[in-house]
Image (cartoon, rainbow, N blue to C red):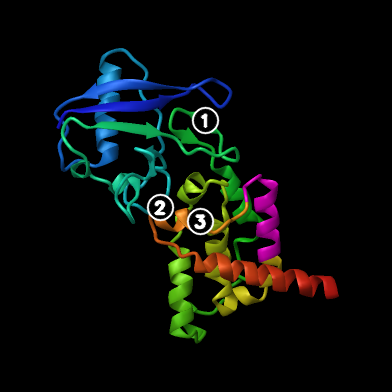
Amino acid sequence: MDLTLKVWRQKDSKAKGKIETYPISNVSADSSFLEMMDVLNDNLINDGKEPVAFDHDCREGICGMCSMFINGQAHGPARGTTTCQLHMRSFKDGETIYIEPWRSGSMPVIKDLVVDRSAFDRIQQAGGFISVNTSGNTQDANAVPIPKINADKAFDAAACIGCAACVATCKNSSAMLFVAAKVSQYSYLPQGEVEAKDRVINMVNQMDKEGFGNCTNTGACEVECPKGISLEYIARMNREYIAATISSEKK
């Protein structure tokens, strides 16, 4: 395959970025999108040019690092697929492909296609955990009976990889789908019920501090999410947040 790549190049968050054009030839249809990017960088290095900076780690669709817009779509044209699992057979010979970083004020560009997603880390630190005694007295996970429907929903919520496709796709740059998934994966389980009220309040407050927008139910996040996280989790988080704020006001 012969392709024309239109790649966003930006030195840092303060510099003015622009689209650069790079032709690339003999791309295998069986290669992944990131492998194609590796070939592009090899070509640039051999030509004495600076390679394109992009995030990647596991290349198995579980770490959420490979976040980029491909032809205006988060992670590219395939549904339920991360960029690293996207293969070049999804494109046609001679096609022009636009590659850009996530766009959100809360996630500034570090360089080229790499963005700062540390805001998600701070939201997690605000409440995305359970407090347990780990001094040798912990129970086995399967020692606590849990209804299967709750276990399934908690597992589906925990599938979120924190890639921020939801934020980048949302017209409001809302992180509600991410926060809802992280809140729900604990609240469905008895281990997470103890701190449920504090968790949802702290995580939502931290989300607001980071400057993310609110949800207006356009549903774009659910469509673009590579793990298919449902909007139902946002509804659940809203219910939990309202209940938690009302109960805290009564105290």
Q: CA distance from mark 2 to mark 3?
A: 12 Å
| Front position among marks 1 and 2 | 2
**Res 131 seen here:** no
> Start and end of the magenta stretch?
200-213
**Res 247 seen here:** yes
Residue 218's mark? 3
Frontmost residue, 95 versus 33:
95
Say if the magenta span includes residue 201: yes
| Front position among marks 2 and 3 | 3
Q: Is residue 59 left or right of residue 249?
A: left
Mark found first going from the N terminus, 1 or 3? 1
**Rendered view: 144 above or below 171:** below
Q: Quadrant of the C terminus?
A: bottom right
Which residue is label 2 attached to?
224
Helix, strand or loop at disc 3?
loop
Mark found first going from the N terminus, 1 or 2? 1
- Name the outermost residue toward the top: 48
What's under tag 3, amino acid-wise? Thr
Look at the numbered discs 1 and 2 and tell me whether their residues touch, using CB distance below 8 Å. Answer: no
Frontmost residue, 43 versus 226:
226
Mark found first going from the N terminus, 2 or 3? 3
Frontmost residue, 70 versus 115:
70
| Front position among marks 1 and 3 | 3
Which residue is label 1 attached to?
110
Q: Main structural element of the magenta stretch: helix, strand or loop?
A: helix
